[in-house]
């Protein structure tokens, strides 16, 4: 997975219950220590998807084409789910609720707009 990641991945004790995060300014991924192997893999893929899709240029004040936070979370978790499924890892118990929560109240057209982003990113990580 480290080869697929555009940024370094490290493990740490993350406060607040988060499983991981992509730090935009430090350009690195942190994964919560001590999780199950499945949750660790899924979280790493989720954060790699953020790093590939949602990096910003700190020198550019306005990121007009950047998706909102809800869309970013739906995209990252959907990529993680698709990649895990490809390798026979079932994350549906966690992923379905996560995506449902972040996509709640969204129009179908908004969700469909992310499908190609999700597909192409998952394909890139699988290849």
Image (cartoon, rainbow, N blue to C red):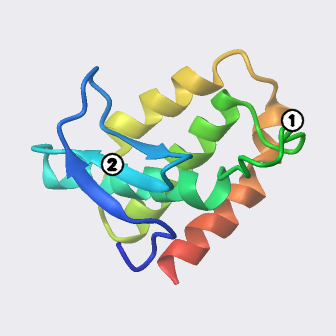
Q: Position of residue 87 (x, y in %)?
A: 35, 71
> Residue, x 31% and y 66% (percent of image)?
88
> Residue, x 81% and y 25% (percent of image)?
107
Q: Position of residue 54 (x, y in %)?
A: 66, 50
Closer mark to the observer between disc 1 and disc 2 = 2
Label 1 secondary element: helix
Residue lying at the far left in this picture: please name it.
Answer: 34
Q: Is residue 36 left or right of residue 84?
A: left
Q: Is residue 97 left or right of residue 1?
A: right
Crowding near pointer 2: few (<14 within 10 Å), some, many (20+)?
Answer: many
* Closer to the camera in the image, 29 or 117: 29
* Closer to the camera in the image, 28 or 19: 28
Residue 32 appears in which quarter of the rendering? top left
Numbered tag placed on residue 30 in the rendering: 2
Q: Position of residue 30 (x, y in %)?
A: 33, 48
* Closer to the camera in the image, 54 or 41: 54
97 to 65, vertically: above or below: above
Dot 1 corresponds to which residue? 109
Residue 35 appears in which quarter of the rendering? top left
Cα distance between the residues tagged 1 and 2: 32 Å
95 to 106, vertically: above or below: below
81 to 85, vertically: above or below: above
Contact between marks 1 and 2 (CB within 8 A): the answer is no
Numbered tag placed on residue 17 in the rendering: none
Crowding near pointer 1: few (<14 within 10 Å), some, many (20+)?
Answer: few
Image quarter of the N terminus:
bottom left
Is residue 81 at least partly visible in the picture? Answer: no
Residue lying at the far bottom in this picture: please name it.
Answer: 127
First along the sequence among labels 1 and 2:
2
> Residue, x 47% and y 65% (percent of image)?
7
Q: Position of residue 2 (x, y in %)?
A: 35, 73
């Amino acid at each position: 997975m480290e080869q697929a990641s555009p940024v370094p991945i490290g493990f740490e004790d993350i406060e607040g219950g988060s499983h991981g995060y992509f730090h935009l300014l430090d350009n690195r991924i942190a994964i919560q220590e001590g999780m199950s192997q499945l949750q660790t893999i899924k979280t790493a893929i989720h954060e790699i998807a953020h790093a590939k899709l949602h990096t910003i240029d700190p020198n550019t004040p306005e990121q007009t084409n950047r998706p909102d936070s809800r869309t970013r979370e739906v995209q990252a978790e959907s990529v993680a789910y698709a990649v895990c499924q490809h390798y026979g890892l079932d994350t549906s118990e966690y992923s379905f609720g996560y995506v449902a929560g972040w996509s709640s109240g969204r129009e179908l057209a908004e969700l469909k707009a992310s499908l190609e982003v999700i597909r192409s990113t998952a394909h890139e990580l699988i290849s």
